[in-house]
Image (cartoon, rainbow, N blue to C red):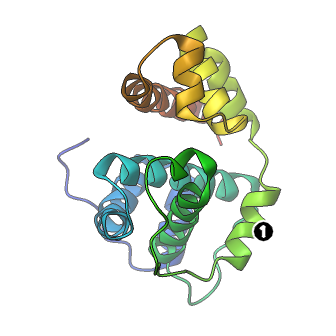
Amino acid sequence: MSTRPLPIYSTDQDFYDALSRRDERAYQYLYAESFPSFRHWVLSNSGTEMDAEDAFQKGLLNFLLNIETGKYQLQEGTRITTVVFEYCKYVWLTELKSARFRTRAAMPDVIETPDTTDVVKDLERMEVVNAVRQSLQQLKGECRKLLEWFYVEEVSLREIAERLNMKETSVKSKRYDCAEKLKSFYQKTANQQGL
């Protein structure tokens, strides 16, 4: 990450426009403004630091893809950081409820449940955009397979570990590394296409 000071956007519209232009500083600002409170929320709701990073990445990617496809349009009076937080919360709540997580931790008795009706509809309708597909194609075999299995086919980490003959913790680490590579390819692809 750059050591330049993060920009302060005068309005959420300016911030939204910067994200739409794929301004790297806007991504950094969004991360700095949203991740600390989201991490705290996940740690308070049966998660670990790595769980928070994973859910945040997945939620942020969903949000950015929805900007890309036009499925998310900035609404007056809505803060972008709040919307991103909701996307990420939805990912973590889904993870908590899923079968792949049940073997690791019991569902907590009380969870702060966000109002995610619109977010859920957006996520259910969301399609992966062309730039992401092209970026996936640039990944080498095992990395591409791992991300497609996990994010597209929703295969559990345990099953991916068995398929790749690796430990589950190693798969989690590799998934993070592969996601970073994908992000880098995605930014290059998007810039080349002038998106």
Query: Residue 75 or 159: which is nearer the viewer?
Result: 159
36 sits left or right of 94 in the view: left
> Which amino acid is tagged 1?
Lys
On the rendered structure, is 166 left or right of 116? left
Instruction: Name the secondary structure under disc 1.
Output: helix
Rendered-image quadrant of the N terminus: top left
As displayed, is residue 31 above or below residue 22?
below
Picture residue at 37% right of the left edge, 66% below the top: 38
Comparing 164 with 195, the one in front is: 164
Tell me the residue at 53%/26% (across/down): 185
Name the residue located 42 percent from the left edge and 31 percent from the top edge.
Answer: 172
Asked whether residue 139 is in view, the answer is: no
Residue found at the very far right of the displayed protein: 125
Instruction: Write down the residue under mark 1.
Output: 121
Counting from the top left corner in percent of width and height, residue 154 is at 67, 39
Residue plotted at (74% across, 42% down):
128
Whether residue 85 appears in this view of the structure is: yes
Is residue 183 placed above or below 140 in the rendered structure? below
Q: In this view, does 28 lie to the left or right of 65?
A: left
